Image (cartoon, rainbow, N blue to C red):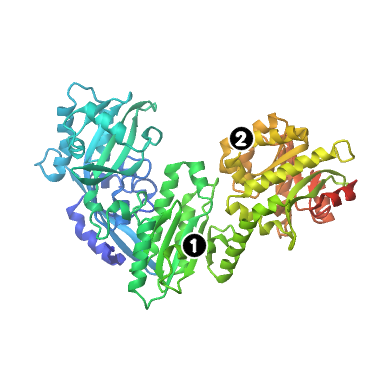
Amino acid sequence: MNAPVFTKDQLDELMRAAGPLYDVVRLVDPGECRVLYETGNASDPGKEKTVGDNNRCFSVWDNKERCYDCASYNAAITGRIHEKIENHKDNYYRIVSIPVMKAIEDGKPRSCCIEFIKMLDRTAARSPVNDAINEEFDAYESVSSGHDISLQIMEAAGKRSNTGIVCFDSEGKCIYVNESAFRLFRIRNDLEQMQAFLQDWLEVNYQEHAGRIWLQYFSYGGKEHVVEVQHFDVRDADSRLLGRYFSFLDVTPLASGSDEALYKRQHDKLTGVYNWECFKEKASMHLAMNEKARHMLVRLNIKEFKLVNQLFGLDKGNDVLRKMALMCRDLVGEGDVFGRMAADHFVVLTDEEHFDREQYRKRAMALSDSFGNNLYKLHIQIGIYRIKNRKEDISLMADRAKMAIRSITDDYPVSFAEYNNDMMLNTLYESEVVNSFADALNNDELHIYLQSQNDSKGNVFAAEALARWVHPDQGVIAPEKFIGVLERANMIHELDRHIWEKAVRQLSEWKGTDMENIRLSVNISPKDLAHLDLVEIFIGLVKKYDVSPSKLNLEITETALMADPERCIYLVGALQREGFQVEIDDFGSGYSSLNLLKDVHANILKIDRGFLARTEQEKRVEVILTHIINMARDLNMGVITEGVETRRQLELLHSLGCDMFQGYYFSKPIPITEFERKYF
């Protein structure tokens, strides 16, 4: 359902009117976990300022981070009222969260929730809510007789759920099951049977993912139930594991409230928004029923999102995705459709009149800023496809919005691109490259060109081997015309292995000649790191051609290293132990250059050419370069500066302490025969 829109004055009036009936009434932003303002008669939570530290709404519930089963988040994302019971200082509170939209003067309404909070008295007359609480203690006494259950486990379980609860001790033995859990799974008061059932039924490896929340399906009596599962570890003050507990909530009534299909078929488990299949169905229906309106399909994703999961963990990544879902909800207009395709890809079908680029930019920028980490910055990319034929397949529309995203080359926190016919032509070109690549390999059309690496006097000591496609009809194809295409097609490893072998073969051919002291460096792409056994491959090549590993330098970009730091640290060490030299390429272009040097013991730094680009801040650039060069020397690393194009740049870098250079000042990349004539 659509949440009602209120002005600030209307919200104030509503909250003041409800204040005397509740201990606290507060307006929260569930996406930011933040209290906007509150009122009430200042009962127990209010006495201590419910908003807690930095207005974080979860802090009053004795939590240090977002509640995993946040009532307001669930209310905002589903558009339905949610209830929950929380614990604070041995008291229980009932929270009723109602989704609303707060009118904003300069933009679209903001998704918020009003929380009505009331302290519950367990000794008072029984009520449905109090029964849910008392049931926990009654069931504990009757079901777990003879077992010494840790009070800390039970207190923690009481904080988190008023539904089915199952507790395990630190050895993994089931020690407590409440009545609701037995009833849900149709198991009659048998702890061992419950333990065996859960060991077989649970889909998530909970030992590795404390704090997870997920949906599973349980069939009984010919009916499939949708069950929300939450898992938590309980530890003492010294972080020793006391036990684990699970809470189970049957959300089938909510799931079956859909008119079109079962909840599991319609909604994304993580974010609660439409999944891809349901989005396509709803979007097609909307287009068919609104023939006069002009629509666009907007696709959003986060650049290199996998780094979030790899660097900060799955829970952090999931939190970002939930916030992105809330952002989409806030941006859509009445009747618009939005959902999650997969991973970090979200789609919005919107009326052109509803689309406000500035609002998209503001909300996406706020999401990027909220990430707040210097190791990685969120870069949100937004592709737009204006729909001209509403009978087109929705998947085709999404593909064209993706083409727009792929055209983005900047590195801004928020970037937009709109589909045009040139992008289709580019897609056709990329298809031609992919289809002809195998023939190019077989016909030996892919060659290495060499760009020299020189000292300050111009003497050559090494060269970088770069791929060039020499087409029989088109001549030399520039690398930017095909390397990116092969990367996107997951074929770059085939090109790289071809180039590596050509480079090692060339080193073998130079043995016993004036060129035998020249080293060659080759590039390793991020996808090579992920999919190839590089140590085995390079050892095999130097053995095959009887070449010393010291003649072959291996260049890895700092961005590639940061994609999987632990694996790369091991890989760099393993290659060095075999005698290869490892270079960090494009140093200074990524997000965490200095942090990288702490753990990766490379042999050479290649300073990114961007430092030599024209700028009005030349003095600042000199300071930075000086420190990089000195730092590398202190770490026993050599330094090569790329992109040297003028005598002035060479002299400046030499004065700063750099003594190895690469760039057009010395030579552009040239064929092997030309390289040999030029230098020997």
**Image quarter of residue 81:** bottom left
Residue 585 image offset from top left, x and y in percent: 69, 45
Residue 114 appears left or right of 629: left
The residue closer to the viewer here, 600 or 622, is 600
Q: Indicate the secondary structure of the residue bearing disc 1.
A: helix
Residue at the spot of label 1:
399
- Placement of 279 over or under 226, stated as above or below: below
Label 1 CA crowd tier, 10 Å (few <14, some 14–19, many 20+):
some
Residue at the spot of label 2:
569
Residue drawn 59% across the image and 60% down it: 431
The residue closer to the viewer here, 485 or 152, is 485
- Quarter of the figure with the N terminus: bottom left
Q: Closer to us: mark 2 or mark 1?
A: 1
Mark 2 or mark 1: which comes first in sequence? 1
Residue drawn 40% across the image and 60% down it: 328
Residue 530 image offset from top left, x and y in percent: 57, 41
Any part of residue 86 in sight: no
Residue 61 image offset from top left, x and y in percent: 30, 42
Any part of residue 135 in sight: yes
Residue 660 image offset from top left, x and y in percent: 80, 44
The residue closer to the viewer here, 461 or 433, is 433
**Image quarter of residue 39:** bottom left
Question: How many badges with numbers are in the image?
Answer: 2
Residue 503 appears left or right of 286: right
Q: Which mark is residue 112?
A: none
Which residue in the rendered view is the most extreme toward the top? 146
Q: Indicate the secondary structure of the residue bearing disc 2.
A: helix
